Amino acid sequence: MDAIDEQILGLLQEDARRSFSDLGRRVGLSTNATAARVRRMEEDGTILGYTVLTGGAALGPRGGLEVFIDVRLDSETDYDDFTAAIEPMGQIVEAIHLTGPFDYLLRAYAPDTGDLDALLRRLKRDCGAAQTQTRVALRPTRVPAPSRRAG
């Protein structure tokens, strides 16, 4: 599996109903080349199937696990290089540059713990993360804005 396959998987995880032509346009391949890659990933077991989630079955807007990953970059990695490296990763939906012991807080979605493990490994292998700390969201709670009293 290469970086283009990972991009295709990320896009399919966002929307499994994307057409081969849309996928190809987004990753820079022809429709036929994209279709061949998807079929190969289906045949080799990388893609096991396609699912419809309804109601409360999805923890996040993309389904699966919603995770928050604190990232400390290695001393060789530039902030701009890190953000450029994570930009094509479809699982990551937000990156916040921080003060304190970690450099970034990432909000991401992973279908399962195996995919989360692969994401964490990729951050360290390809993006310059020296250390990560991960938290999994269990249940969102909406906090209403405080009411304003005329005074």
Image (spheres, grey):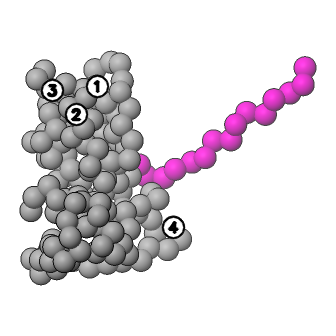
Q: Are marks 4 and 3 in contact (CB under 8 Å)?
A: no
Which of the two discs, 1 and 2, labels the residue nearer the N terminus? 2
User: Which residues make up the magenta segment?
Assistant: 136-151
Q: CA distance from mark 1 to mark 4?
A: 33 Å
Whichever of labels 1 and 3 marks the residue nearer the N terminus, that label is 3
How far, Cα to Cα, is label 1 from label 3? 11 Å
Residues at marks 2 and 3, CA–CA distance in whole angstroms:
7 Å
Toward which corner of the image does residue 78 lie, by quadrant? top left
Name the foreground residue: 112 vs 108: 108
Q: Are marks 2 and 3 in contact (CB under 8 Å)?
A: yes
Nearest-to-viewer mark from 1 and 3 = 3
**Residue flagged by tag 2: what amino acid is it?**
Phe
Residue highlighted by disc 2: 82
Three-letter code for the amino acid on which mark 1 is drawn: Asp
Q: Which residue is mark 4?
A: 56
Say above or below: 134 vs 37: above
Which quadrant, please, contains the N terminus? Answer: bottom left
Mark 4 vs 2, N-terminal side? 4
Q: Along the polypeptide, which appears first: circle 4 or circle 3?
A: 4
Q: Residues within 10 Å of mark 4 (few under 14, many from 20)?
A: few
Q: Magenta-highlighted stretch: main secondary structure?
A: loop
Whether residue 76 sits left or right of residue 97 in the image: it is: left
Q: Are marks 1 and 2 in contact (CB under 8 Å)?
A: yes
* 3D distance between C-alphas at marks 1 and 2: 10 Å
Callout 3 secondary element: loop
Disc 3: which residue: 77
Q: Nearer the viewer, mark 4 or mark 3?
A: 3
Q: Is residue 138 magenta?
A: yes
Q: Is residue 106 left or right of residue 36?
A: right
**Of callouts 2 and 3, the N-terminal one:** 3
Q: Which residue is mark 1?
A: 103
Which of pointers 1 and 4 lies earlier in the amino acid sequence?
4
